[in-house]
Amino acid sequence: MSVVMITGGMGFLGSHVAREFLKHDYEVVLTDVRVKRGLIKDIEEKVKIVESDITVPTQLNETVKENDVDAIIHYAALLSSEAEANPEQAFQVNFDGLWNVFEVARKNDLEAVIFASSIAAYGLGVPEIVKEETYTVPFTLYGISKQLGEMLGLWFYRKYGIEFAAFRYGSVIGPGRRNGGASAYSTLIIQKPAQTMPYVVNVPETARIPIVYVKDAAVATLTAYEKIRNLESRIYNLASIIPSPKAKDIAALVQKYLPNAKIAFKPDPKTTKIVESWPRDLDITRAHDDFGWKPKYSSLDALVKDFINDVRDRPDMYEI
Ligand SMILES: NC(=O)c1ccc[n+]([C@@H]2O[C@H](COP(=O)([O-])OP(=O)(O)OC[C@H]3O[C@@H](n4cnc5c(N)ncnc54)[C@H](O)[C@@H]3O)[C@@H](O)[C@H]2O)c1
């Protein structure tokens, strides 16, 4: 079976995607700038863990060689708000580090690179329902780095034959996501009450953003990788719930499963403005037509129920 290396692999998406690849008998190497075992407690014996910084090409190269890596799933990055607050560091990690990842793939003749893009690649002025071919003019440094990752991936594919896929996730929600960023409410509104904590939502009840459940995102990654040689397109929107739910719809379902949940709304104007600048809905037809992906958690009710159960099953893993 192939060996997949996940950069930023001890973070939120990396840990869930690792679980999905392990279920299908892949060998998984998790690399991260810091070894953090919190989100991988249940799988740490089954993966190889390497402390490695994507801004240091020699470290990347050694890890790839020593572990006979076949493909890289690239998640290591500074997230949106961190990147805006620390532009120089963001440039090192999200731009230079990105280049290093593609270069190490080329030098070692790897099969594929899979890249975590984002709806931040779209920027302002997009229609309410966005298709992948919509012209993208990102307006944050983070969004620019996501657009660059897509373009570099296509270039390395055309020039060197390294297979490539990128996912434009809506807000990825699920157990273990870090607090921070304007979209964090879409996870914390479920996670905090599941941990019996009160939560004050910092956007209006009517706020609506595309969300993808992390378990759907993990299946999309595995499926696209397994079909990577037959993909027609390379860049895919991913969202679980169509149309996107309002914040108050999520709160109502949390209240259904956790009647004692304490959720209040106190919109913060800055966060609200950011959230309102994003697309409301993503068209996910392309991922379905190209590699047969359909979100398992396309019902908000099923998603919220699974999320709550997961947090309750593993209370020590998802402390935030
Ligand atoms: N969470 C979301 O809603 C969302 C939405 C769209 C795109 N994404 C993208 O998905 C990817 C993963 O996001 P996440 O939510 O899991 O974030 P996360 O912060 O949980 O994981 C990112 C990981 O990258 C690591 N990292 C940072 N700098 C590094 C470096 N120089 N070398 C190696 N590792 C480094 C961090 O330690 C962290 O563990 C990111 O690229 C992010 O931009 C996330």
Image (cartoon, helix red, strand yellow):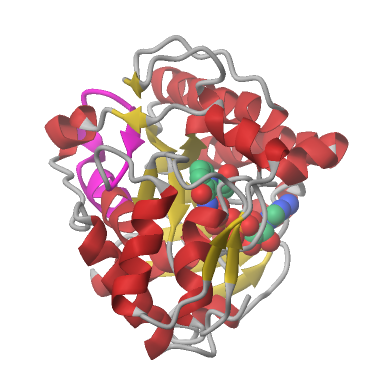
Tell me, yes or no, if residue 93 can be seen here. Answer: no
Where is 11 relative to 207, above or below? below
Q: Quadrant of residue 10?
A: bottom right
Could you say which is closer to the camera, residue 89 or residue 312? 312
x, y percent for residue 287: 22, 35
The quarter of the rendered structure image containing the N terminus is: bottom left
Where is 312 relative to 109, above or below? below
Image-based side of 310 in relation to 12, left or right: left
Instruction: Report the magenta residues as a range.
Output: 221-240
x, y percent for residue 220: 28, 49
At horizontal 40% and vertical 30% (from top left) the residue drawn is: 280
x, y percent for residue 255: 36, 72
> Does the magenta segment cover residue 171?
no
At horizontal 75% and vertical 40% (from top left) the residue drawn is: 83
> Does the magenta segment cover residue 228?
yes
Could you say which is closer to the camera, residue 149 or residue 320? 320
Tell me, yes or no, if residue 310 can be seen here. Answer: yes
Could you say which is closer to the camera, residue 225 or residue 213? 213
The quarter of the rendered structure image containing the C terminus is: bottom right
Q: Total of numbered circles in the picture?
A: 0
Q: Quadrant of residue 22?
A: bottom left
At horizontal 45% and vertical 18% (from top left) the residue drawn is: 159
At horizontal 36% and vertical 49% (from top left) the residue drawn is: 212
x, y percent for residue 151: 51, 20
Image-based side of 292 in relation to 207, left or right: left
Where is 311 relative to 85, above or below? below
